[in-house]
Image: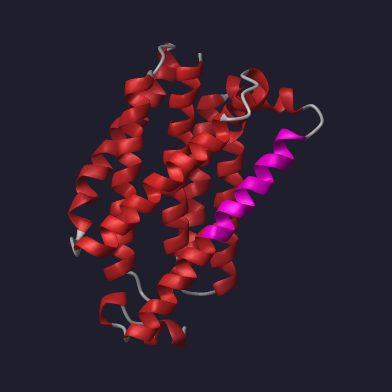
Amino acid sequence: MEYYARAESVAHAPSEARARFIRRTYTHLAFAVLGFLVLEYLLLNLPGVERLVQYLTYSWLLTLALFIGVSWIADRWARSEVSRGLQYVGLALYVVIEAIIFLPLMYVAVFLLDDPTLLPAAAIITGLLFLGLTVVAFTTGVDFSFLRGVLIIGGFVALGLIVASLIFGFTLGVIFSVAMVGLAAGYILYTTSNIIRYYRTDQYVAAALALFASVALMFYYVVRILIAFRR
């Protein structure tokens, strides 16, 4: 516990410690994205992946509940002040659960639409949006922590609509997906602002998880938008 007691918030840390924290955060984010891509590839190439996709699709409400629960646990572990190893377990667990929750959507994009340009296009769009938002957060000097309340309310509203659509059987269309991309953009600004100011210099694993969650959310709904346009 001693090294946690010595850790400073990024805003008050020396420039060298601040730069090291930011470098470690984005390095861990890159590895999380790489791990997600590898896992998704392996899942899509599993024998009998169709049955797994059908199970996840038909039990989507249970899958969503499991995702929320496991995500909460993973985030708690990634913020652990007891063990660095537990932090990495939390990040890895979150990447795994994201790969599973993405599987039905990826299956549609890869096997049902049979459009090899769709996922690369979604990745490029997401990457450019993430880069632009990151530049805005780092260069404007604006503290985006004021977005917290809006993001919490928006997240609960979105979750409520998703659950209602699963229970009552209506479809959430392109407008909802665009709104979710906007929500993800808000999360990226908020998290990046916190990385610049409020995280401790030893919390780079938790910071990487928060960024990965926001990027994954944006990518998911960018893919949904492109699928809707292809159809």
- Of residues 225 and 76, the one nearer the viewer is 225
Relative image position of residue 70 (x, y in whole percent): 53, 47
- With 30 as the anchor, is 22 left or right in this view? left
Question: In this rendering, is residue 119 above or below 15?
Answer: above
**Residue 131 in magenta stretch:** no
**Residue range highlighted in magenta:** 30-45
Question: In this rendering, is residue 158 above or below 214?
Answer: above
**Residue at 28% of width from left, 46% of height from top?**
186
Looking at the rendered structure, the number of numbered marks drawn on it comes to: 0
Q: How is the image coloured?
A: secondary structure
Res. 80 visible in picture: no
- With 93 as the anchor, is 148 left or right in this view? left
**Residue at 61% of width from left, 48% of height from top?**
36
**Residue at 50% of width from left, 22% of height from top?**
227
Residue occupying the far right of the picture = 47
Q: Main secondary structure of the magenta part?
A: helix
Question: In this rendering, is residue 210 above or below 53?
Answer: below
* Residue 104 quadrant: top right
- Of residues 117 and 102, the one nearer the viewer is 117
**Residue 32 in magenta stretch:** yes
Relative image position of residue 69 (x, y in whole percent): 49, 44
Relative image position of residue 208 (x, y in whole percent): 46, 61
**Residue at 41% of width from left, 14% of height from top?**
171
Relative image position of residue 218 (x, y in whole percent): 42, 40
Res. 36 visible in picture: yes
- With 28 as the anchor, is 139 left or right in this view? left
